[in-house]
Image (cartoon, rainbow, N blue to C red):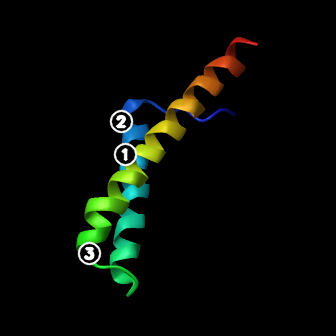
Amino acid sequence: MPLEFDLVKTVGAFVAIIAVGTVALTMMPGMTTGTILTMVLPSMAIFGAVMLAIGVKHGEYRATR
């Protein structure tokens, strides 16, 4: 049975994954919160968006074959 994702579920999962990663990084003693919020968070969001776009295109390709 295929997964039934719509825009709301996809955005919710995307935001949840980024939020969990950001919270986990802020709790670790490795970097300052400012560095995480200004450098790591935007790069995680951009990378996630690119991977999501590639995944959607791959799903569209698989659905038409």
Whether residues under marks 1 and 2 lie with C-beta atoms below 8 angstroms apart, the answer is yes
> What amino acid is at disc 2?
Val
Q: Which residue lies under the disc numbered 1?
A: 12
> 34 or 12: nearer the eye?
34
Q: Answer few, some or many: residues within 10 Å of disc 2's Cα (few below 14, many 20 plus, some between 14 and 19).
A: few
Q: Position of residue 6 (x, y in %)?
A: 44, 30
Chain-order first, disc 2 or disc 3: 2
Residue 57, given in percent of the width and then of the height, sits at: 58, 23
Q: Give x and y (percent) for residue 60.
A: 62, 19
Identify the secondary structure beneath mark 2: helix
Q: Residues within 10 Å of mark 3 (few under 14, many from 20)?
A: some
Give the quarter of the figure containing the C terminus: top right
Q: Nearer the viewer, residue 38 or 12?
A: 38
Residue at the spot 40% in from the left edge and 65% down from the top edge: 20
Q: Quadrant of the N terminus?
A: top right
Q: Which residue lies most toward the bottom here?
A: 29
The one nearer the camera, 7 or 40, is: 40
How many badges with numbers are in the image?
3
Which amino acid type is shown beneath numbered disc 3?
Thr
Residue 1's tag is none
CA separation in Å, label 1 and label 2: 6 Å
Residue matched to label 3? 33
Q: Tag 1, which secondary structure?
A: helix
Pick whichever of labels 1 and 3 is earlier in the sequence: 1
Q: Position of residue 5 (x, y in %)?
A: 50, 33
Label ID, residue 8: 2
Q: Residue drawn at (60%, 35%), measured in percent from left and top?
A: 3
